[in-house]
Image: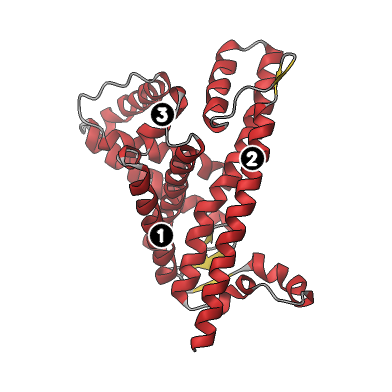
Amino acid sequence: MAALLLALLHPLALILLVRLTLPARYALLNPYAAAADALLGRLLAFVRPALRLGDRALCVVLLALDLAACAAVLTRLGGPQLVLAGAAVATFPASGFLGWFGLAALDFAGFYLALLAGNFLLRLWHLGRPLPGYSGDLLALATRPFSGLRLWAQAAALAVLACLYVALAFVCADSVRYPLFEALAPLAEKMSAPVAFLRAQSYPVPLQALLLAGMTVLNVLGQLRDYIFLFWVILALAALMGSRQMGFFLRDVLRLLCGRLPPLRLGPLDLSPLAAMAALAVAHGVLGGLFLFLVGLLAGGFAHVV
């Protein structure tokens, strides 16, 4: 339940953040963005009689309350901990509510970083072209001004932000453990040539931060593959239920997630999502393997120098 609440609170914080950064008279022509803005307008109208503030001030107050709610939810997850890149667990000092509030802000920063990584990887997936459909336009809106940069500038900005995010977590944390690599340690001992990156906890801190920053970005490729499968299944259910509006939305999202792959039809079935999942799985494996190999080489070089 706590994880589900975080999944709802983070998008609300994102909507508030986008609303705060948009110009006062910005026209939302995207129907998805307009619907989210209309819901936010109703929320602002509901709380305005109690606080009597302008829209921007109310958004700031609601953003602070959202982060406070995230902090309260994080207390239900078993302690002041943050999972980094699905591999490491950073444990933070329990220094009162302000400490939890900072952890909630850091947790939202990880969510937003994954969104930026998704925008960049989808741009690569679409061969550098603008993201298609209403969903692509919505993603570009949610990640502005990052989405307005050239592709090489997005890559540089994403690398810097990922390293800063992990480095900040390292600075604030009491300790960092690698349960994933610890679970694989018995397997590594049986190998004739042990895999270097499985000894990540013995790396110097900058190299640990580089490892987790790269894994943070690469993990988004696996998430894109999972989302394709999820939306494909929901689309099949929507077709059975005869929901045209839901079907239009899901096809729009799948068009974004499937990249430049052409439609692959078998009768009424569109199999291009399966092809996209296979392609993303290969890309994830190859890029992840190359990155971990590079980090292993750097670690080996560092150990040789020391």
Q: Is residue 241 visible to the viewer in this orientation of the structure? A: yes
The residue lying at 72 percent from left, 76 percent from top is 193
Could you classify mark 1 by the number of other residues whose Cα lies within 10 Å: few (under 14), some (14-19), or many (20 or more)?
A: many
Task: Provide residue 167's location: percent of width, then percent of height.
Answer: 41, 66
Give the Cα distance between marks 2 and 1.
Answer: 29 Å
Does dot 1 land on a helix, a strand or a loop? helix
Task: Provide residue 230's location: percent of width, then percent of height.
Answer: 65, 33
- The first of marks 2 and 1 along the sequence is 1
The residue lying at 57 percent from left, 40 percent from top is 224
Residue 279 is tagged as 2
Could you classify mark 3 by the number of other residues whose Cα lies within 10 Å: few (under 14), some (14-19), or many (20 or more)?
A: some
Task: Provide residue 273's location: percent of width, then percent of height.
Answer: 65, 30
Nearer mark to the viewer, of 2 and 3: 2
In this rendering, would 98 be left or right of 56? right
| Mark 1 residue type | Tyr
The picture quadrant where one finds residue 164 is: bottom left
